[in-house]
Amino acid sequence: MKADITIMSGDGVGPEITREAVKALQAIGAVFDHDFSLNEVLFGGIAIDETGTPYPEKTQQACKNSDAVLLGAVGGPKWSDPNMKIRPEKEGLLEMRADLGIYANIRPIKTYQELIDNSPIKNRYLENIDMVFVRELTGGIYFGEKKKTDTFASDICEYSKVEIERITRVAANIAQGRRKKITSVDKANVMATSQLWRSTTTELIEKEYSELELEHIFIDAATMHLLSRPADFDVILTDNLFGDILTDEAAMLTGSIGMLPSACLGEDSFGVYEPIHGSAPDIANQGIANPCGAILSVAMLLQYSLSLEEEAQVIEQSVAGVIEESILTKDLTGSGYVSTEEMGTAVTKKILQT
Ligand code: NAD
Ligand code: IPM
Ligand code: MN
């Protein structure tokens, strides 16, 4: 197969982890004889430095002309002064998500037996965890009108019924291929958007997906249930902000945020794939970042944008195999550890051995 893939390494640990993910992608190309054409473009803080804007026209065109985008992470102390007019997160990441119409953020949470002791949660809570977050990505409080003066600030949270329906369908379609259960998270006891969220999800699931079970829980309780009964969850449907917060919390069930991939999807097969973590400036340029979230994002890219199921599984098995052999980056171990590059090379070797 031929595919055009745009690479946006971004800032901080972005280039370090993306390099390893690209190695895995190229290994898949070699093993399965696919012609992946890779095009690296500027995005985020580095794009501000070099072009004055975090999502330059050339980057926009590259994304739109490709089958999928692989993204590292953006942001960092150099660009985090809130008074800056242009920032990697808002004018870069959020603008890109809106521009490309990728409203569905899929974040699977998978634990590995070998990493269980690395989680701060007691082992007995961590058996049989297998959940997928479906987070709305282009609406809510992130995108409503913002106002700020020296003495007043506001963020408007908005959702239309259509936006809630389309993300609910994504969650429902995923739940159908799994344990057929959706947990929708909201704050319907306080927020109008959550009340519309609750009534819309209820109505749609009853009408179009009556075989699915739908439960509603409040966000405050959700943060607790996620730790006290994580194995009960199958598909968790959230708005933009709640999903952002809950997935970082869920990362701690797995032992490290460095393990988790994500897919950002719209109406067709195009998608942007990125680890759920950020640019990790505290560990950038030390060669210790965990590249697995980025590598597993390649697996999601192969699965969702290119329909290459077997190839996606080879990546997942290769990562699992490396972890089984205790080849671990610093975040995954209390004692000895391998570098970002060594971890990437170990996964790539496994892919080449298939
Ligand atoms: P972060 O996810 O970058 O880091 C949180 C903690 O997790 C840090 O201690 C970091 O060292 C650790 N960590 C993250 N990724 C890791 C990896 N691959 N291996 C090992 N450890 C890892 O979150 P933050 O510190 O709140 O944010 C840093 C910057 O990243 C900010 O500018 C933020 O806006 C940005 N950010 C970007 C994205 C994105 O591009 N999608 C996502 C989240 C945060
Ligand atoms: C993420 C990040 C972003 C978000 C930030 C950097 C804008 O935290 O992708 O999870 O909140 O969506
Ligand atoms: Mn986040």
Image (spheres, rainbow, N blue to C red):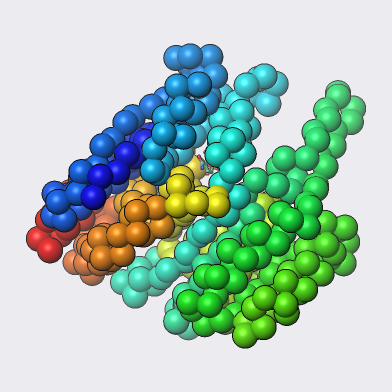
Residue 310 in the image: state x and y as whole percent: 26, 65
Q: Quadrant of the C terminus?
A: bottom left
Of 183 and 36, the residue lying toward us: 36
Of 30 and 235, the residue lying toward us: 30
| Residue 206 relative to residue 74: left or right | right
One can see residue 7 in this view: yes
Residue 124 in the image: state x and y as whole percent: 48, 83
User: Can you tell which quarter of the image residue 306 is in?
Assistant: bottom left
Residue 158 in the image: state x and y as whole percent: 80, 48
Total labels: the figure holds: 0
| Residue 37 relative to residue 84: left or right | left
Q: Residue at x 38, y 27 (%)?
A: 41
Q: Residue at x 42, y 25 (%)?
A: 42
State whether residue 313 is above or below residue 348: below
User: Can you tell which quarter of the image residue 134 is in?
Assistant: bottom right
Extreme-left residue of the structure: 353
One can see residue 330 in this view: no
Q: Residue at x 62, y 85 (%)?
A: 211
| Residue 278 relative to residue 7: left or right | right
Residue 344 in the image: state x and y as whole percent: 23, 49
Of 146 and 333, the residue lying toward us: 146
State whether residue 83 is above or below residue 260: above
Of 275 and 203, the residue lying toward us: 203
Q: Residue at x 64, y 54 (%)?
A: 136
| Residue 318 relative to residue 195: left or right | left
